[in-house]
Amino acid sequence: MRDVKAQVRTSLAARTVGKTEYLVDGRYGWAAACEGAFGPGAHPVPICHEWNTIAHLSHYEGDPEARPFTRGELQMFFDYADEQVERAASSGRKGALAAYRDATVYKVLYGWGLRRTECSKLDAVDFGRNPQAMRFGAFGTLNVRFGKAKRGQPPRRRNVASVMGWAVEAVQDYAVNIRPRFGFPGQSALFVTERGGRLQPTEINARFAAYRDALGLPKVLTPHSLRHSYVTHLTEDGVDRRFIQVQVGHESDSSTAVYTHVSDDFMNTALGRALGPALDGDGEAR
């Protein structure tokens, strides 16, 4: 009896840190053990339910298997996407415009840290000037009008400052020289299909998977990995964490932290900077 009571106390203590499942699950036998020790009806029951707890207003985005591209993988992916444009154009076959569009899509996903749906719903007018970055011209800032919404609320808007000059050049070239060649002047979407519709997230996924698999890259990489890469690489480059958080539309730093998977080189460099003041030139403690 004393042993049973001790076990029950231990189990109830575990309850305080949220591990209650095995206390009330009949497969574990705790309810029967408690009734045997304390009498009929004396067993633990859950006290927290959907109707008496605060609901999570935003979904958790941190897939534990997700990871960003390494810089080498990212360059390989972008190079391959550009090569498909050249191959289609040189062979004279249909699809060169679509290949160019998709190569630009992936650069925008990375260059502004976007989700697929956010990118799909961009209109041509969503880019604008940033007085603090006049060198980017009409592409200094991006108005994301369909950011991820909280449950029961409308999409959240945010302005994302352009920070990567090469990405600005890529989308500017597409918007000025390629998009008009699709031939649908009445279509407001930035990324247009060959039939005049708006490019959908499923189409972004399909081309991405084809390129990834052709390169033999890990299947764990998805279009969302480009957003992870944006956060990780800016962190490695020393960009202020709060700035990155606002750029990607996270309300809390903990969400941004989920996206950050810095490289070993970055960690070693950061460690060296941290230890520097405490060590002399020979690496000996002062």
Image: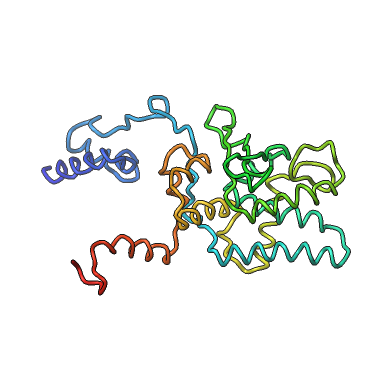
The residue located at (57%, 48%) in the rendering is 113
Q: In this image, 178 relative to 104: left or right? A: right
**Image vertical order of residue 12 relative to residue 98, above or below:** above
Question: Which quadrant would residue 206 be assigned to in this image?
Answer: bottom right
Q: Position of residue 110 (x, y in %)?
A: 60, 52
Q: Is residue 256 left or right of residue 4?
A: right
What residue is rendered at 40% in x and 28% in y?
54
Q: Going by the picture, which residue comes out furthest to the bottom? A: 282
183 lies above or below 43: below
Front residue (pair 86, 120): 86
Tell me residue 62's x, y (percent): 47, 48
On the image, which quarter does residue 221 sit in?
A: bottom right
Picture residue at 24% right of the left edge, 67% below the top? 279
Q: Position of residue 234 (x, y in %)?
A: 50, 53
Give coordinates of residue 128: x percent, y percent: 66, 39
Quadrant of image for the N terminus: top left
Quadrant in which the C terminus appears: bottom left
The residue drawn where x is 57% and y is 37% is: 148
